[in-house]
Image: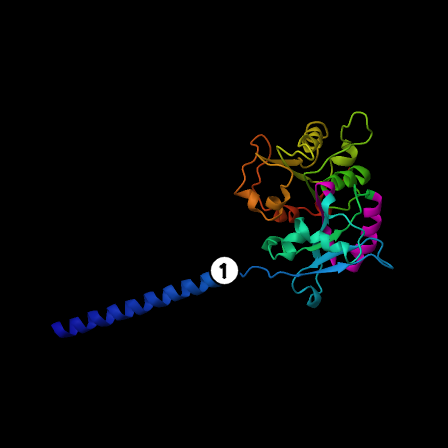
Amino acid sequence: MNRRRARLAIALAILAGTVAAAVATVVVVRHRHQTSPPLAMGTMEKMPLGPGNPVGFMVYRPAGYERSRTSYPAIVYLHGFGESGHGDALDLNVLVSAGLPRLVSTGQLPPSARGFVILAPQSSGPVDDPAVLHRWLATALPRYRVDRDRLYLTGISMGGQGVFDYLDTYGDANEFAAMVPISGAFVARPVPDGVPSCERMAHTPLWAFHGDSDDVVPVQNSINVVANVDAHCRPPERLRLTIYLDSFHNVWDRTYDLSGRTDNPTEPEWDPYDSDIYRWLLDHRRHDRPHP
């Protein structure tokens, strides 16, 4: 009798161990299914100046773009003065030395940015002409499967000024869903007071980034537009400004590669870099915005 009880106890122990192992296996399998692999890098291509192409540019297309029929969110990126050129095949090589094109060319584009189409027109400088950009957009955007409700504008240094200038020229034309100027100057119209226009500046969500010790474009340029619009224009969505402490002109690397969220302290009186900039862009769509 004791032997039977011993055998029964052993059998139950084995059965319990088998069930526990099965449960553990199921848990592991479920955990694997919940973790999706990061989105693969897409490809970047030169589109040089030429017949039917009034502005030379580079275009990044997400992985699988050629096989897909879907429309993609898109970022229009405006480069800095150091990447200026005439848009021919040779000059376009300069674009990959900074900003979003550099992250693409080095394979460092964050996974959350890899699902965008990225269009990077090249300007001959010293500033981006809003009218030229406006005409180019009308010819370039129809060539790609771009979701026009998820179209965004960003730029660095000279390109950051280009973002401000474009918004100050065209206002809320229901064109861009959100904008991100980085280390950019703001020269408002009309000149003598330099105060942003509520009519033009207050209706497009905007998140500016700047270094507190920028010796090329003083941080006050970004403060002027963000503080004035938020204080006097009652924007439907408050404009945001992140100021990196102990930082000079180049704060775009840490903004675009997302390292600024954890590795770089920011001015506590302004907005912390507390969310993925690409996910913040995707939170905004044109059709969701109230219009003036």
Query: Magenta includes 8?
Result: no
Label total for image: 1
Where does the image place residue 206, in percent across and percent down from the top left? 69, 39
Label 1 environment density (alpha carbons within 10 Å; few <14, some 14–19, many ≥20):
few
What's the residue at 57%, 37% (across, down)? 272
Where does the image place residue 230, in percent across and percent down from the top left? 68, 31
Judge whether 198 appears above or below 280 on screen.
above
Where does the image place residue 256, in percent across and percent down from the top left? 62, 47
Q: Say whether residue 177 is visible.
A: no
Between 87 and 283, the one nearer to me in the picture? 87
The N terminus lies in which quarter of the figure? bottom left
Q: Say whether residue 218 is visible.
A: yes
Q: Which residue is mark 1?
A: 34
Judge whether 29 appears above or below 191 on screen.
below
Which amino acid does the dot numbered 1 rest on?
Answer: Gln
Query: Magenta includes 142?
Result: yes
Q: Is residue 138 left or right of residue 217?
A: right
Where does the image place residue 234, in percent across and percent down from the top left? 70, 31
The C terminus lies in which quarter of the figure? top right
What's the residue at 24%, 68% (across, down)? 13
**Residue at the extreme top:** 193
Element type where label 1 sits in the image? helix
Q: Which residues are magenta?
A: 131-159
Judge whether 13 appears above or below 216 on screen.
below
Between 157 and 190, the one nearer to me in the picture? 157
Judge whether 11 appears above or below 150 on screen.
below
**Residue at the extreme right:** 51
